[in-house]
């Protein structure tokens, strides 16, 4: 009996200590939860709002270009369903004048995305090699006007162009030895037939200095990858300054986002796959700072292109994809 009373007394005597310990434990749990919540909020708040009012286009290359990502288990060559929630433009390859792309464009439209028509094959052909630039030598096809007219007629673009975002003409033209005269002839003819759709020119960074931009071009850009931050890279900034010096008043800039990962190329620059979210954020910050930039196009979405080891944006870690989605939604408003 007495033992039981003594035990009860000891329990009662120790009760404040137990309660105090419990309170401290609960307080620590609450503090940890609060800190975690605050950190998440801070990360969210740290994402830069879109401050460039002209920055309205976002999308990716290789979305609908007949490329089957070799790293997945599905037979898939159209990725519009994957990019559409945070994109409003997407790459679509045209090969021949008879290509009827209306169903492909209608599918894009159903996702509120417009086509970036990749027209290199329609206008230019490989005629040999050269010792300059890329080593490839492309000429304007002699029947380029007939080919373009046929393509317009096949797709009824003489009556409806609502699904078109822009015409991507050439393929790094100066780098691939497309003469200024040839490129201008093609661009001028497109502009004469469908004047309201922007014409996009993207050059390779080593050829920016030699680039001449036709007046019929609307959007210009260049690609330079494997950089942690284009805003602080002196080479990139010099190339951007050079490109801007060639720009006419009516022309705008497109920023080509490094959206892929090549282990030997990015790795040698000290960039890991997990770092590609910071890389994307830095490109977005630059696009915000440059008010001449009207859009960002990521190279590229599916994997295995250029090199078997190349990882497209869809195969990058979740933290990188989350950042791409934040950027795309901020730009497009989706």
Image (cartoon, rainbow, N blue to C red):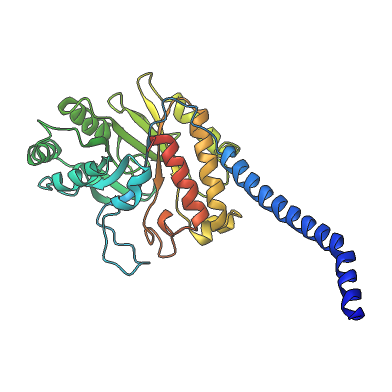
Instruction: Tell me the residue at 30%/44% (across/down).
Output: 90
Q: Is residue 256 toward the left or the right of residue 168 in the image? A: right
Residue 131 position (above or below residue 170): below
Which residue is the extreme one toward the front? 1
Quadrant of the snapshot with the N terminus? bottom right
Quadrant of the snapshot with the C terminus? top left
Which residue is the extreme one toward the top? 249
Is residue 140 visible in the rendered structure shown here?
A: no
Is residue 109 visible in the rendered structure shown here?
A: yes
Residue 304 position (above or below residue 326): below
Residue in front for this viewpoint, 249 or 186:
249
Residue 80 position (above or below residue 219): below
Residue in front for this viewpoint, 245 or 156:
156
Residue 181 picture location, percent across and down:
26, 31
Residue 246 picture location, percent across and down:
42, 25
Q: Is residue 303 toward the left or the right of residue 162 in the image? A: right
Q: Is residue 294 toward the left or the right of residue 237 in the image? A: left
Residue 19 position (above or below residue 222): below
Report the number of discs: 0
Residue 140 picture location, percent across and down:
21, 40
Residue 128 picture location, percent across and down:
27, 52
Residue in front for this viewpoint, 160 or 134:
160
Examine the image and state in which quarter residue 231 appears: top right
């Amino acid at each position: 009996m007495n033992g039981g009373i003594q035990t009860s007394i000891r329990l009662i005597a120790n009760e404040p200590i137990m309660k105090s310990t419990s309170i401290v434990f609960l307080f620590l749990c609450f503090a940890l939860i609060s800190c975690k919540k605050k950190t998440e909020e801070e990360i969210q708040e740290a994402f830069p709002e879109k401050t460039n009012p002209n920055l309205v286009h976002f999308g990716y290359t290789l979305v609908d270009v007949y490329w089957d990502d070799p790293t997945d288990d599905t037979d898939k060559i159209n990725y519009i369903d994957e990019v559409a929630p945070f994109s409003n433009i997407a790459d679509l390859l045209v090969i021949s004048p008879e290509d009827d792309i209306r169903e492909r464009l209608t599918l894009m439209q159903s996702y509120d995305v417009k086509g970036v028509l990749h027209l290199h094959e329609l206008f230019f052909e490989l005629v040999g090699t050269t010792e300059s630039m890329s080593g490839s030598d492309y000429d304007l096809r002699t029947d380029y006007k007939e080919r373009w007219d046929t393509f317009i007629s096949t797709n009824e673009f003489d009556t409806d162009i609502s699904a078109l975002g822009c015409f991507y003409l050439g393929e790094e033209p100066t780098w691939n030895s497309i003469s200024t005269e040839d490129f201008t002839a093609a661009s001028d003819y497109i502009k004469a037939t469908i004047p309201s759709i922007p014409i996009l020119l993207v050059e390779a960074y080593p050829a920016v200095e030699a680039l001449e931009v036709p007046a019929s071009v609307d959007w210009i850009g260049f690609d330079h990858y494997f950089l942690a931050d284009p805003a602080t890279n002196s080479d990139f900034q010099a190339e951007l300054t050079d490109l801007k010096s060639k720009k006419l008043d009516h022309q705008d800039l497109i920023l080509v986002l490094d959206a892929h990962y090549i282990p030997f190329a990015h790795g040698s620059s000290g960039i890991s796959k997990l770092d590609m979210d910071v890389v994307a954020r830095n490109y977005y910050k630059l696009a915000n700072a440059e008010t001449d930039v009207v859009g960002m196009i990521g190279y590229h979405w599916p994997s295995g292109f250029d090199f078997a080891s190349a990882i497209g944006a869809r195969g990058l870690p979740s933290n990188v994809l989350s950042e791409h989605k934040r950027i795309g939604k901020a730009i497009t408003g989706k």
